[in-house]
């Protein structure tokens, strides 16, 4: 299988790239910077997913080299941990461009390559901060809520092509995304979960494995939050 993973240079994206390489997948990764991941069957592109032209160029090259893809994992994203009164419009705009429009651009660019797969899958990333309506994360939550709405509508609009579209919402995992978040805030978030612990990378890959399994062709438009968040 051939999988495209955005934001593959670090964090969850890096883990998923190595995880699916170990499972024998061909992995096509992208990030705004170069990567030190050098493995057989790994192909890296420097792409800013918020830039539509850059994403189109990326997909065109993938088309020439690989012909099709089976899975698109829209992992690339960023966060902002500030109260509304201290969040400039430029920050809100940047998060919407990266988290929501980045996902939008990638789906638009790769959907025709997915149509050629026998079991095409799209997995988007949201966050538990959305259903919890976490204070101090208003711009981040708004951008990820847009991803959730996009996931649900897209699942209906492209179901005729047998492409499933689902999303995963991780709880805090020890990555750069939460490195500057105060420990007290992390503890408060964890206390909102049914299972009171930090997430692990393997928790994420477990859900994605379920979503992309050929047996999951009747699962679409769903959002799975880790940790027991409703």
Image: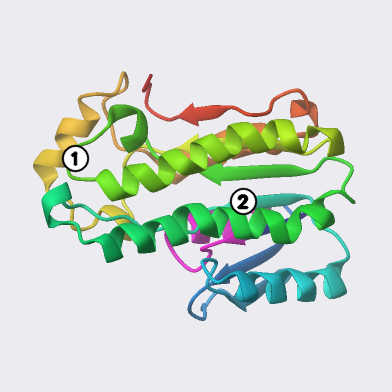
Q: Position of residue 108 (x, y in %)?
A: 70, 56
**Left or right of 54: which side holds 118?**
right
* Colouring rule applied to residues: rainbow
- Asked whether 157 falls inside the magenta stretch, the response is no
Q: Secondary structure at mark 2?
A: strand
**Mark number, residue 186:** 1
| Front residue of 76 and 136 | 136
x and y, in percent, of residue 210 in the image: 65, 31
60 displayed left or right of 12 = right
Foreground residue among 156 and 191? 156
Name the chief secondary structure element in magenta: helix
Which x, y percent locates residue 47?
57, 75
Give SS at disc 1. Answer: helix
- The span picked out in magenta is 5-22
Local crowd size for mark 1, using a 10 Å CA cut-off: few (<14), some (14–19), many (≥20)? some
Q: Tell me the residue at 88%/65% (across/down).
A: 67
Mark seen at residue 73: 2
Q: Where is residue 38, by image quadrant? A: bottom right
Is 12 on the left-hand or right-hand side of 216? left
- Picture quarter with the C terminus: top left
**Mark positioned earlier in the residue sequence (2 or 1):** 2
- The structure residue drawn at horizontal position 48% and vertical position 79%, both measured from the top left corner, is 33
């Amino acid at each position: 299988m051939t999988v495209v993973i955005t934001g593959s240079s670090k964090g969850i994206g890096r883990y998923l790239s190595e995880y699916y390489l170990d499972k024998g997948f061909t992995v096509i990764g992208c990030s705004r910077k170069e990567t030190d991941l050098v493995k057989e069957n790994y192909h890296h592109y420097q792409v800013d997913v918020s830039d539509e032209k850059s994403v189109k160029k990326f997909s065109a090259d993938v088309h020439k080299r690989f012909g099709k893809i089976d899975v698109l994992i829209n992992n690339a994203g960023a966060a902002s941990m500030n109260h509304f009164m201290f969040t400039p419009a430029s920050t809100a705009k940047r998060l919407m461009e990266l988290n929501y429009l980045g996902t939008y651009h990638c789906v638009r660019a790769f959907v025709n390559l997915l149509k050629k797969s026998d079991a095409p899958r799209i997995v988007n990333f949201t966050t538990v901060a959305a259903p919890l309506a976490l204070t101090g994360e208003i711009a981040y939550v708004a951008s990820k809520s847009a991803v959730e709405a996009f996931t649900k509508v897209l699942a209906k609009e492209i179901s005729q092509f047998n492409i499933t579209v689902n999303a995963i919402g991780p709880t805090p995992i020890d990555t750069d995304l939460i490195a500057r978040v105060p420990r007290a805030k992390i503890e408060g978030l964890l206390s909102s979960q049914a299972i009171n612990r930090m997430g692990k990378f393997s928790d994420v890959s477990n859900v994605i494995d379920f979503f992309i399994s050929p047996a999951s062709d009747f699962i679409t438009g769903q959002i799975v939050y880790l940790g027991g968040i409703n």
